[in-house]
Amino acid sequence: MTMTTPDVLGRARDLFEPAARQAVASLFSDLRLAAEYHFGWVDADGRPTPGGGKGIRPALAVLGAEAAGGSAADGVPVAVAVELIHNFSLLHDDIIDDDRERRHRPTVWALFGVGDAIIAGDALQTLAFEVLLAEPGPRRVDAARRLGRATQDMITGQAMDMAFDGRDLVSLRECEEMEGYKTGALLAYSVGTGAVLAGADSPTVTSLERYGHHLGLAFQAVDDVLGIWGDPEVTGKPAGNDLRERKKSVPVAIAMDGGGVAATRLVELFAADVTDAGVTEAAALLQAAGAREATIELARGHLGTALDALAAVDLVASAQLELEELARFVVERQH
Amino acid sequence: MTMTTPDVLGRARDLFEPAARQAVASLFSDLRLAAEYHFGWVDADGRPTPGGGKGIRPALAVLGAEAAGGSAADGVPVAVAVELIHNFSLLHDDIIDDDRERRHRPTVWALFGVGDAIIAGDALQTLAFEVLLAEPGPRRVDAARRLGRATQDMITGQAMDMAFDGRDLVSLRECEEMEGYKTGALLAYSVGTGAVLAGADSPTVTSLERYGHHLGLAFQAVDDVLGIWGDPEVTGKPAGNDLRERKKSVPVAIAMDGGGVAATRLVELFAADVTDAGVTEAAALLQAAGAREATIELARGHLGTALDALAAVDLVASAQLELEELARFVVERQH
């Protein structure tokens, strides 16, 4: 199933990108080049290129502000901060996962070296706090405090994910706990703290965070399906990439929870050397065990919970509609 | 020349360490183990060990607060935050510099792996902002905002240092600019923002920062002398370690600025493969060119500027004396 890209993604990018570019331009030259290349704004020599990511987090920040009765511009500092944090984590994760390509281009560490990728990521992390604290006021301070919590949660999720690599079995419960930290925390932050900047009350922020958390779990479940069965042309990664990297993703955890012959064989395949035949067999095994369908169902369940969270509080109707549309888009991406 | 360790180092550690341990204990288990090991509080299995760093930054934070008329405890949040930032940078620098040992123990990346060292560093960086923003109030917010600036400066210094690796020649001016960012910024932050937490006025903060900046340059010059001529038993690194790593340190920059036969030969040695004979020759060349003495003189000059900065404002006398003593200790360490 293919859906039209929601308007809010372009609208948020038009607001967010000039502010993000201005923030990144304040970095020391070498750090700036690595960061601008990573964002897809320039090539390896610093020449402008078209491109950039999907921008779901900036869109959430802008909609969070609007949903709470503010303007889109109110959410922009959170949009910039969260995108800086997200991209610092990508810079470091690409080193940790030994990933040489992202969005059909060499990763920063593969192009500029591990050291440059480490410090460019460090610089983006600090810059996120600088952006929020550049202006005074209790809302900005609250946003910075919340950013600390959300970033620490994201790092915890990454640590949990790395710990999974050393284990034979991971349950769905453990996998979703990890994803809640690794992906959910930053999505919850984006939409909830976008609303904080617009002066939202505590129940509104909590409901929006609940929406963001479950959207994150839905997003990740869909990503896990695409990571195994996605079209390499679309994902920018080889077919079965997550299986090649022995990732304990949601479909794998579901099949392992299911036990029986499929789980036993899957553990064997994950313990053996990676081969094309092994990847193909594992994908077929997961499909036969119903793990692909179960993961899509799981994503739809989180979508429902996310939409319910929106309905639980009084939001500006137009923004609520766009939040609903964005959530459906995330879940119904090509799979 | 050997000096007695100033009392303030032990006094600051007694205040700082319980607070730092409490902050680090909030991290996810794997991150916590890597961090506590790095701090020298536990061994690789998590068993308590005696040890820990010199703690110059915490001492500066505590003295900054006292110099501005506050209590030592007022400076502790800055002491904790700055030590978290300093140690995040050490975790990452050890990867970048391929250093396998620190304080006579394996570095975190060498023991736990590069990925664990990257995310443990990331977690400490975030934790520093969390510690400052954990309590409200304009002084804490100002301290967090200043931390962003100082951390970004430190990362800029690291980027400059890495850029030096790809060059034949580095001037003393460039070398000191880099060190001002890499080391000076965080020392200036420690003492100046310790005073901010005690409610210091702007001229006092500026003067203390000037003291910290020049103390940083003095500290680094002495470190550069020890990095070439220091006793391996004391430094915990092999003799001539900085020359082995082709570090464009202050003595090297001074000799390169001097030109002539010594500079030409030094550039040759830095371009060639590293050998024991080459390291010995480079050290002798630097000594003969007067670079060792000139670096010690430079450190003493910065010490003088630092002490003048203290004298320019009205500080609590006992704290001023301890700041003076700490500065002299830093410069007159074994060399």
Image (cartoon, coloured by chain):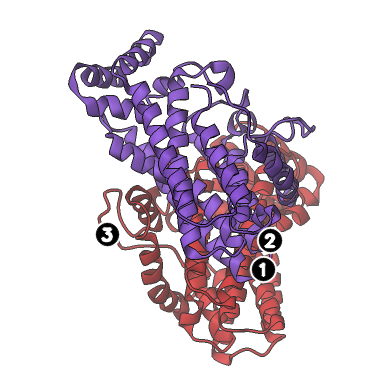
Chain colours: A purple, B red
Indicate which disc residue B213 carries: 1
Query: Seen in the image, is B79 located left or right of residue B184?
Result: left
The chain carrying label 1 is B
Q: Compared to A281, does A212 lie above or below? A: below
Query: Residue A325 placed where, x, y %?
Result: 56, 38
Mark before the other along the chain sequence, 3 or 2: 3
Residue pictured at 79% horizontal, 51% vertical: B257
Indicate which disc residue B180 carries: 2
Query: Residue A181 placed where, x, y %?
Result: 41, 46
Residue B25 lies in what quarter of the image?
bottom left
Q: Compared to A184, does B133 lie above or below? A: below
Q: Label 3 to label 2, Cα distance in Å?
A: 35 Å
Q: Nearer the viewer, residue A71 or B332?
A: A71
The chain carrying label 3 is B
Amino acid type, mark 1: His
Residue pictured at 53% horizontal, 75% vertical: B61
The chain carrying label 2 is B
Mark before the other along the chain sequence, 1 or 2: 2
Helix, strand or loop for disc 2: helix
Q: Nearer the viewer, residue B169 or B296?
A: B169
1 and 3 marks in contact (CB < 8 Å): no
Query: Residue A309 placed where, x, y %?
Result: 44, 49
Residue under circle 3? B48
Q: Nearer the viewer, residue A10 or A142?
A: A10
Q: Label 1 to label 2, Cα distance in Å?
A: 7 Å
Query: Residue A300 placed where, x, y %?
Result: 41, 33
1 and 2 marks in contact (CB < 8 Å): yes
Q: Compared to A226, does A22 lie above or below? A: below
Q: Pointer 1: residues within 10 angstroms few (<14), some, or many (20+)?
A: many
Residue pictured at 35% horizontal, 62% vertical: B51
